[in-house]
Image (spheres, coloured by chain):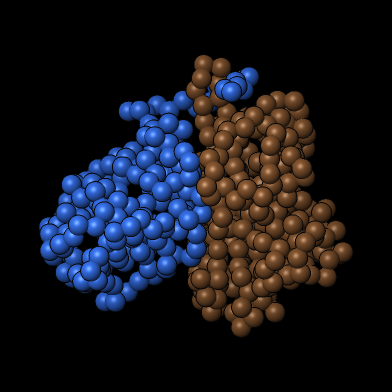
Amino acid sequence: MAIANKGFRGRRTESARQLPPGQHLTTDFPVLQAGPTPHIDLDDWRFTIRDERGHQHVWTWAQLKLLPSDRLTVDIHCVTTWSKLDTKWEGVSLDTLFESVETTAEFALIGSYGGYTTNIPVVDLLGGKAWIVYGYQGEPLSPVHGGPARLLVPHLYFWKSAKWVRSIELRNSDTPGFWEGLGYHSYGDPWREQRYAGD
Amino acid sequence: MDDGSTSKLHWRVARVVDSEPETDSAQTIGLAVPGWRGHLAGQHIDLKLTAEDGYSAQRSYSLSRPADGERIELTVQQIADGEVSPYLTGVRPGEEIELRGPIGGWFVWRPAEEARILLVAGGSGIVPLMAMLRERVVLGGAEFRLVYSVRSPADVYYARELGQLERDCDWLRVAVVCTRAATPQTARPPGRIGASDLAVPGWTPDDAPRVYVCGPTGFVESVTTKLIGQGHRPSAIRTERFGPSG
């Protein structure tokens, strides 16, 4: 099936490390989203984890900022084939936020200001794999990149790292989120190139 | 048609059937795709180029018109230091290219929808919006307005066809907004899209239109901020953004 496009050489990635299949490096930070950018007043901002029994754990902005934070440097991979290396973030590990949450649920549905949703297995949110981030490259995270706070799950395609994150609902069954209901892959592992359903 | 949501999107080998310049820096390319089963206006494809040593690069391109059987069409803007677009704008009929799709179920227009439609395009962001207009020519009853921002008149894609459609179709009005150099016959001085360009009588927030905005990130941010400032509901605005990714 593989064909060769005669005369195509490509702009080889001079990457410090291997990229997932089908990805190319960018130094920009492209923006992909389905609708307008919401602007959220920090006084009104809340983040909620709702467990499978309906119990709610709610943080205000001030409460979130009081929690111990991590600074991390990670690579991010967008399903539209760009990857960006060594992005620097600051935020709170979901392990910290889940300390007070008792759950045996296997699935999470992430919700955002503006109505976006995405589904992620709980096991992919814990164990040092996911954060609520509010800082990017040493600055407050801008609205166009998901500020005041977004989810960061760098080991999955970047659409899973929901901008303007508002809630995590813990569920016993898996519910497709926004893109996952429109033909995108339910899990989205860039190293297995899981872009679309069936990949 | 295949809605693509449950079945695997296979890579297919398409054959270039024609390639015509759209502007000085954009090319419209027709491709024959064996087994293509149609798509929705606004959807895109992923396209893959492979070098002789196996290195490959993928990019997404919007489809510019409804399928004609197994023929699909793209318009590719050449990005000066791009990886894929300079190759694509030079392809010749007969060449084979791998692609898969259709992809995307959100930035689409379906002919059965009756809401008034406001299309706002920035540069090559016209491509998926043109697919919607071409679909509407064939099917549906919705009223459309298009606000199309370009640097100068020479950058307008599909210029003759848009002029013809506006003359022939009572459901369409087109406003071209030039940011750097305007046509002599227009009274509007060159400049970026402003609130007055988006205040289209009959397409105000009270008329509850659905709005599609497509263009570079800065353009989409600027336009959507103005639309929301005018009172359009965020949930009525669908966006597609692109960066210079080659």
Residue A199 is situated, as x and y percent measured from the top left of the image, at: 47, 38
Residue B231 is situated, as x and y percent measured from the top left of the image, at: 53, 79
Residue A48 is situated, as x and y percent measured from the top left of the image, at: 25, 68
Q: Is residue A79 left or right of residue B44?
A: left
Say how many tags the image has: 0
- Of the 4 image quadrants, the one containing the N terminus of chain A is top right
Pick whichever, B227 or B62, lies toward us.
Answer: B62
The quadrant in which residue B139 appears is bottom right
- Residue in the image at 61% along x and 70% along y: B210
For the question of whether residue B173 can be seen, the reply is no
The quadrant in which residue A140 appears is bottom left
Q: Could you say which chain is coloured blue in the image?
A: A
- Residue in the image at 72% along x and 31% along y: B16
Q: Is residue B52 left or right of residue A130?
A: right
For the question of whether residue B171 can be seen, the reply is yes
- Residue in the image at 52% along x and 47% along y: B6
Q: Could you say which chain is coloured brown in the image?
A: B
* Outermost bottom residue: B206
Query: Vertically, is B227 above or below B133?
Result: below
Q: Is residue A75 left or right of residue A199?
A: left
